[in-house]
Image: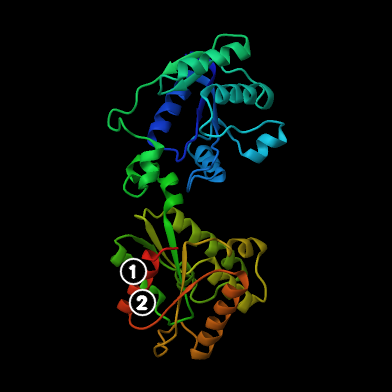
Amino acid sequence: MKHFNVGLVVGKFSPLHLGHEALITIARSSCQHVILVSYSLPELPGCEADKRRRWLNTRFPDCRSLVVTPQQAESWGMTLPDNLEADSLHRHFTASLCLDILRCKPDAVFTAEDYGDGFAQVLSARFGKPVEHIRTQRLADFPAISGTLIRSDVHQYRHLLAAEVYADFVERICLLGGESTGKSTLTRALAAALNTAWVEEYGRERWEQKAGCLEYHDMLQIALTQIQREEQARPDRYLICDTSPLTTLFYAQHYFGHADPQLEALSHRPYSLVVLCEADFPFVQDGTRQDAAFQAMQQAWYLQTLSWRGIPFLRVNGPVAQRVNQIIEALRSPQ
């Protein structure tokens, strides 16, 4: 039997780590309903509100999550307290959220810190009923786990994050270029050089499955599957992507004259680095490609579209090893 009706867990969750997850799991096992409240002022690098909201909803879909921004607080006639403000201000702010926004009075607050006793006292006074503080122990394997530690080097401490959370810190590198510009070869070579995972071009695989007879509806499916494979990959720091939905948009427009609105939206998927492979070696016909004229037209489309959208990109040329070095140098250069 659950001990409490409603439990409350409050944190920056910047990022949401295994210590937080253990605490939330205990709350879920002890309560009929669990409310998760997150806010941070200022926002901490890589942990913006939309990401925290997605992490909480993905990892704990059965909980009620409220991620508060300064703009939301202002719209409610409230002021989001700065991270360095006194504890009492944060406690009363949370109490006001529960009473005025969430319309509930939790029975227990769960923390892994001693401050929870004072927090429960303020909530009890504001709610007009006892609120119990459930003080949990930190994970035995990670006694010093903290958001500050993880933010100092999120890739070193990736083992303290769920895969869905770490994915938002991975730098996706997208390789573009016309047919026979060496994208696939460069994808594998770059992944090997960076000791990480790579995602091959699904459009080509789909083309082979259907013996070259792609239909309009295949275009959206190609883009969706390409993204799905990116999100299912388990890279280390970098993920090398052979093409993107932008490539599928090109083929949709070229072969069918238009594209599904969802495909158009997917073509704006952001990447940490976009690389355009130059067509600076002889065109190679492998039986699936068109010709050098088509390659030139496709290259021109990429140049025009990337420039029109204001997307910075790196142009690489020369042998594969030279291209790999050009990309690695760009990754290591100050942004």
Q: From this view, report whether residue 260 is shown above or below residue 14.
A: below
Q: From this view, report whether residue 330 is shown above or below residue 1.
A: below
The answer to which of 203 and 110 lies nearer the viewer is 110
Q: Residue at x 55, y 9 (%)?
A: 130
Judged by depth in the image, the label closer to the viewer, 2 or 1, is 2
The part of the image, by quadrant, that contains residue 145 is top left
Residue under label 2: 323
Residue 322 image offset from top left, x and y in percent = 32, 78
The answer to which of 25 and 118 lies nearer the viewer is 118
Type of amino acid at the residue the image marks with label 1 = Leu
The part of the image, by quadrant, that contains residue 259 is bottom right
Q: From this view, report whether residue 56 is shown above or below residue 318.
A: above
Tell me: 135 left or right of 223: left
Q: Is residue 63 visible?
A: no
Q: Is residue 58 visible?
A: yes
Tell me: 58 left or right of 265: left
Type of amino acid at the residue the image marks with label 2 = Arg
Q: Secondary structure at mark 2?
A: helix
